[in-house]
């Protein structure tokens, strides 16, 4: 049994740990041509999109924020394009309140087609695909994929009379002129260095400012986002312990343990049977989590976190679960299932018999555990992680299994365990209030997506204030639900302290009605911009040019906080609202740093395009967004946003990098390290 538990924990660790790689390429392309008849064909651009990522479509409004997919045809020899771009499947469309616009994207894969007509027996096509993609944690800047294609058409080339000799170099001269307009340099660094040398501020070395950063000796603050699975596991583990306290599960513990102790020929055999029983519970619920993942698929689970329809369904489910816990009705599986499983357990022997006993427990206790399991699965699935349901059910079942094993090992503990009684009904009612409060979180997501404005921040908080105030009054015995009998005026110590916590939480929420940030519940309540009145402070002063910001930092004698962001980066907005706008963090940044915010999807064109060599290929930088994206790749070997680093006035690393993580103490530590490092220098 020890080996079994060790194996399960090893699998959990493997799922929970992530390899933090900063350079991401979530979309791969395969471009080809296909002739449909003698002189007509299509260019097929096949995109394969990594799980959890989505690529924005070509019918996106460019002013919405995210960059739409675009194809620039650099060379069309012997062909003429027909019509516009088409795709083999419709893009998913959804209103995004962050950008106040309808956005559309593809997941998994898509084939983009462009029809053409051949005008010569041999043709050549070359172009550039410009695209952008995001997942729940990062966005990549608008990226380019170049392609060159050659083909043949079955048409007869028309013979034309010889034309007078034209200045053949005319075309070449045009190309030469185009090249002359491009800053043909091997590296953008040398171009900037030349510009800096001619500048009065040339004392600042552009070579240093753009020099690649060596992270080997730094305390890398960016640990990757491996916390989501850990959060799911801990939440479901706690949910499992709560399920133990319900009237459907708690009375089963002494009955089951006593059965094993009486049935076993020896103490060791009884303990072994109890461990097998616990392991069977884990296997059953783990299979349930894997089944959820298999039915929906990784991409569908990822879509749940943003799908308005799914969030409405989740809201309704949790309301039904809450009403069930309030005693209006019980959610039960057909009794024939439990009877069938019980009779099967009696007919079989050995390990299989114990497994069916565990299965019987899961069926019999469903009226109490079903709403808890449903809520936990909804929460796990809505995180978008494909392993979420499996990890969640492992945590839940582990909590259920532990008491059966411990009481079998130490049967004397059963005598001191709480007896079954009315307190278990109290647990169910408390869970009902909590599920009712959580349901509003999912309704809020749908409300923001559709722009209904029926659950803005002040309305959401008003409902929560009422819910938790009623919970406090219930725990104090002021009322009870009819199904559970009259209210009990006598209140125990535990109920009193729980009531005090609930009422104190209610008081904590009240200032939020007038715009208090309420950082403790910021992950649940709607954002502050949905509220008519708030107490937000002043905006940070931010430079949008790297060299200009570095000169200002040197003049002010401050370190530099570089923020690689994007107009289409949803998680950048989340970090700004949840972390950078927090009062203490805001003041720390405002008083100690010069902030340089570089938008990697900035569409403003450079005064003069620049040509750089990257990975052995020449790349042309046309916009400021191209330039800042190249800076991030060249200097920091990263291409995902949000991305934060702290530099000294020579462009050397002081702290970071730091990516998407709404942990304020961790971000504060990242800032403090930068301040201390600058003072030492």
Image (cartoon, rainbow, N blue to C red):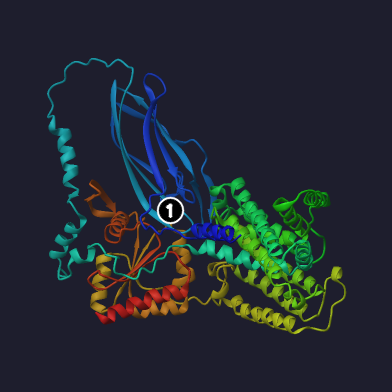
Residue 156 visible in the current orientation: yes
Q: Is residue 45 left or right of residue 159?
A: right
Question: Which residue is at 37% across, 18% downward?
Answer: 38
Q: Is residue 104 above or below residue 79?
A: below
Q: Is residue 255 above or below residue 120?
A: below
Q: Is residue 460 above or below residue 514?
A: above
Q: Is residue 630 left or right of residue 139?
A: left
Q: Quadrant of residue 480?
A: bottom right
Residue 452 visible in the current orientation: no
Element type at marker 1? loop
Residues 613 and 419: in front is 419
Question: Which residue is at 50% across, 60% downward?
Answer: 13
Q: Is residue 575 above or below residue 183?
A: below
Q: Quadrant of residue 488?
A: bottom right
Q: Is residue 129 left or right of residue 381?
A: left
Of the 4 image quadrants, the one containing the N terminus is bottom right
Q: Which residue is mark 1?
A: 66
Q: Quadrant of residue 458?
A: bottom right
Residue 251, horizontal then vertical, whole percent: 79, 67
Residues 546 and 408: in front is 408
Residue 602, horizontal then vertical, whole percent: 35, 56
Q: Is residue 313 left or right of residue 476?
A: left
Q: Callout 1: few (<14), some (14-19), or many (20+) C-alpha neighbours within 10 Å?
A: many
Residue 195, horizontal then vertical, whole percent: 16, 61
Residues 38 and 458: in front is 38
Residue 33, horizontal then vertical, whole percent: 37, 29
């Amino acid at each position: 049994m020890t080996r079994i538990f060790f194996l399960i924990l090893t699998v959990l660790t493997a799922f929970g740990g992530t390899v933090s790689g900063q350079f991401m390429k979530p979309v791969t392309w395969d471009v080809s041509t296909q002739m449909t008849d003698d002189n007509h064909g299509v260019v097929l651009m096949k995109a394969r999109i990594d799980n959890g990522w989505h690529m924005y479509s070509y019918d996106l409004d460019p002013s919405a924020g995210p960059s739409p997919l675009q194809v620039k045809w650099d060379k069309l020899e012997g062909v003429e394009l027909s019509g516009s771009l088409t795709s083999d499947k419709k893009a998913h469309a959804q209103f995004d309140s962050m950008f106040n616009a309808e956005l559309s994207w593809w997941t998994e894969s898509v084939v983009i087609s462009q029809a053409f007509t051949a005008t010569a027996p041999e043709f050549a096509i070359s172009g550039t695909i410009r695209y952008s993609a995001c997942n729940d944690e990062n966005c990549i800047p608008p990226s380019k994929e170049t392609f060159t294609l050659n083909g043949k058409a079955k048409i007869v080339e028309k013979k034309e009379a010889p034309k007078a000799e034209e200045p053949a170099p005319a075309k070449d001269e045009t190309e030469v002129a185009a090249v002359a307009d491009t800053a043909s340099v091997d590296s953008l660094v040398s171009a900037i260095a030349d510009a800096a040398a001619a500048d009065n501020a040339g004392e600042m070395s552009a070579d240093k400012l753009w020099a690649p950063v060596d992270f080997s000796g730094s305390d890398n603050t960016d640990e990757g986002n491996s916390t989501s699975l850990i959060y799911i596991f801990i939440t479901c583990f706690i949910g499992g312990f709560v399920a133990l306290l319900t009237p459907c599960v708690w009375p089963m513990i002494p009955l089951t343990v006593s059965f094993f102790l009486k049935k076993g020929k020896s103490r060791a055999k009884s303990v072994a049977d109890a461990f097998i029983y616990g392991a069977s519970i884990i296997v059953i619920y783990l299979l349930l989590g894997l089944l959820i993942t298999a039915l929906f698929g990784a991409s569908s689970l990822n879509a749940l976190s943003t799908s308005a329809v799914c969030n409405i369904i989740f809201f309704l489910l949790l309301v039904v679960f809450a009403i069930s816990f309030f005693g209006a009705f019980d959610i039960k599986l057909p009794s024939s299932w439990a009877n069938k499983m019980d009779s099967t357990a009696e007919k079989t022997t050995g390990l299989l018999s114990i497994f069916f006993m565990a299965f019987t427990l899961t069926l019999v206790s469903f009226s109490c555990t079903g709403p808890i399991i449903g809520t936990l699965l909804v929460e796990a699935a809505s995180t978008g992680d494909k392993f979420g349901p499996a990890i969640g059910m492992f945590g839940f079942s582990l909590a259920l299994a532990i008491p059966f094993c411990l009481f079998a090992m130490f049967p004397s503990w059963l005598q001191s365990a709480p007896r079954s009684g009315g307190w278990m009904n109290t647990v169910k009612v408390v869970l009902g209030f909590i599920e009712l409060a959580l349901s509003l979180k999912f309704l809020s997501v749908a409300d923001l997506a559709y722009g209904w404005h029926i659950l803005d921040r002040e309305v959401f908080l008003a409902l929560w204030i009422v819910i938790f105030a009623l919970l406090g009054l219930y725990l104090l015995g002021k009322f009870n639900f009819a199904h559970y009998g009259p209210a009990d005026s006598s209140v125990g110590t535990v109920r009193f302290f729980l009531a005090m916590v609930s009422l104190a939480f209610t008081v904590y929420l009240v200032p939020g009605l007038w715009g208090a940030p309420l950082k403790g519940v910021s992950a649940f309540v709607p954002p502050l911009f949905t509220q008519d009145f708030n107490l937000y402070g002043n905006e940070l002063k931010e430079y949008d040019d790297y060299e200009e910001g570095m000169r200002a930092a040197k003049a002010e004698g401050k370190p530099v906080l570089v923020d690689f962001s994007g107009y289409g980066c949803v998680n950048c907005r989340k970090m700004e609202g949840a972390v950078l706008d927090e009062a203490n963090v805001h003041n720390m940044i405002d008083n100690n740093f010069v902030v340089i915010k570089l938008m990697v999807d900035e569409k403003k064109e450079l005064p003069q395009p620049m040509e750089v060599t990257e990975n052995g290929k020449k790349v042309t930088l046309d916009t400021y967004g191209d330039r800042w994206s190249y800076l991030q790749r060249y200097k920091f070997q990263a291409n995902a946003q949000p991305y934060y680093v702290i530099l000294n006035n020579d462009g050397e690393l002081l702290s970071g990098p730091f990516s998407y993580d709404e942990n304020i103490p961790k971000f504060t530590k990242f800032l403090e390290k930068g301040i201390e490092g600058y003072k030492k220098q």
